[in-house]
Amino acid sequence: MEAEAVDSPPGRVEAALSCFSFNQDCTSLAIGTKTGYKLFSLSSVERLDQVHGSNEIPDVYIVERLFSSSLVVVVSHTKPRQMNVYHFKKGTEICNYSYSSNILSIRLNRQRLLVCLGESIYIHNIKDMKLLETLLDIPANPTGLCALSINHSNSYLAYPGSLTTGEIVLYDGISLKTVCTIAAHEGALAAITFNSSGSKLASASQKGTVIRVFSVPDGQKLYEFRRGMKRYVTISSLVFSMDSQFLCASSNTETVHIFRLEHLTTSRPEEASTWSGYMGKMFMAATNYLPAQVSDMMNQDRAFATARLNFSGQRNICTLSTIQKLPRLLVASSDGHLYIYNLDPQDGGECVLIKTHSLLGSGATEESKENDLRPPLPQSYAATVARPSTSTASTVPGYSEDGGALRGEVIPEHEFATGPVCLDDETEFPPELSTSRSDTVETNVAVLLSFRCSQTVFTILVQVSACYERWLDYKLDSSL
């Protein structure tokens, strides 16, 4: 979850940050600037606490923290081929490695540390920083796109298998063998990410219109989401929530999309006894008469929730985190701000901006004025129950805060977890309601007409959609 800021073209806001990244369990934010780097804790909505800051290394363009430990990896433009590993609490350098070309990205968990170059990937054992494997036969990867499962019990690695098509190579970082190849998209890849357990892999192409989720390690497609149809976008961030219930995508536009991963079921016999079941079956039967491209498009799920940014065209990254026992959407932008939104896990809809933090200077915060400009609306669950509370940051067993190794020494074995990592408590999320308004019956008339559907099928779809919408309105009104 890292973004490297690029030079802004004329007319755009100059990037204040050279890079920014969330750590593996989304409890910390790291930023790099021309003067050094900073680490922030994400345990509170109201305040943003700086954990560490260093001006010893200028022009930092990669900074990655290992969970909430004191281990941090830094790469600077002054030495773009050298990786430096620090224990920032002790102020010591654990090690440094130099490579044959510029370092493009770094990924790490409690077992492996990956260094991605333009045409190779180096795999280190993070316990002693020994080089285990070098992948030299990979296609050109000019952006350093790769993903590493944060679950160190499997340590799966994913990287592009082609420069022109959306092929993903799945590699086992423990056995050091290729697992499978996934034909994810027709176009080149723009983003790939694992969920916290390493059992799912999400991807997006450079068009940015469709996001797909695959099972790991067999590579079977589980979900397909449509971000939009009107325009192509550049996906800048793609991330699962820690409980794998949601998938979030941000781009160079002003909208962040959040998709919900429903539980897959083979059959739904109870639907036949309800009006929604009959309507759904009629709708699905009608789509069988449509061209394959149209029916596939209509079967794709749309965003469960969205967030509106007050900017577009800037580099940004997003994440979904539980802060003060509520689900939040966090967006960091290259202009040096962190935006925190409330996410309603029951009904979705538009996320509410509740806090804006400055990542530069004194770290002063700004209260959102967005709600003052809108008419009063019924309060959602997240917007209603969000109140200041005294909660501490979640701690995950693993690399010790007070441990570490001095220069050239082996990192002690006891400072790493020996079993699976419990990254989140699913009971912290409020229970889901059984009634929520769905977008699965949305009919795009322009798309249907463009494919010259027959008048009979078109009329059926319109009538089914209208009846279903009226039934939903009646259902919602009666529940109020």
Image (cartoon, grey):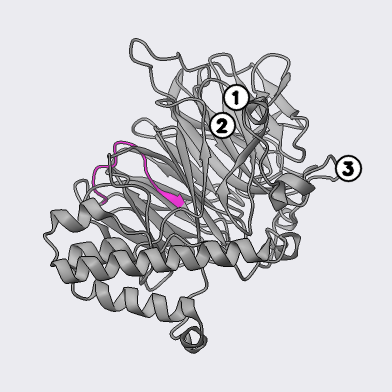
Query: In the displayed structure, would residue 32 be above or below residue 22?
Result: above
Which residue in the protein does label 2 denote?
332
Q: Disc 3 to disc 2, how far (Cα)?
A: 24 Å
Residue 189 lies, in percent from the top left, at: 30, 48
The mark nearer the N terminus, 3 or 2, is: 2
The region drawn magenta spans 138-147
**Residue 309 in view (yes/no):** yes
The mark found on residue 337 in the picture is: 1
Q: In front: 401, or 351?
A: 351
- Residue depicted at x 41% and y 64%: 440
Label 2 amino acid? Ala
Label 1 amino acid? His
Q: Disc 1 to disc 3, how far (Cα)?
A: 24 Å
The mark nearer the N terminus, 1 or 2, is: 2
**Residue 177 in view (yes/no):** no
- Residue depicted at x 48% and y 41%: 256
The mark found on residue 390 in the picture is: 3
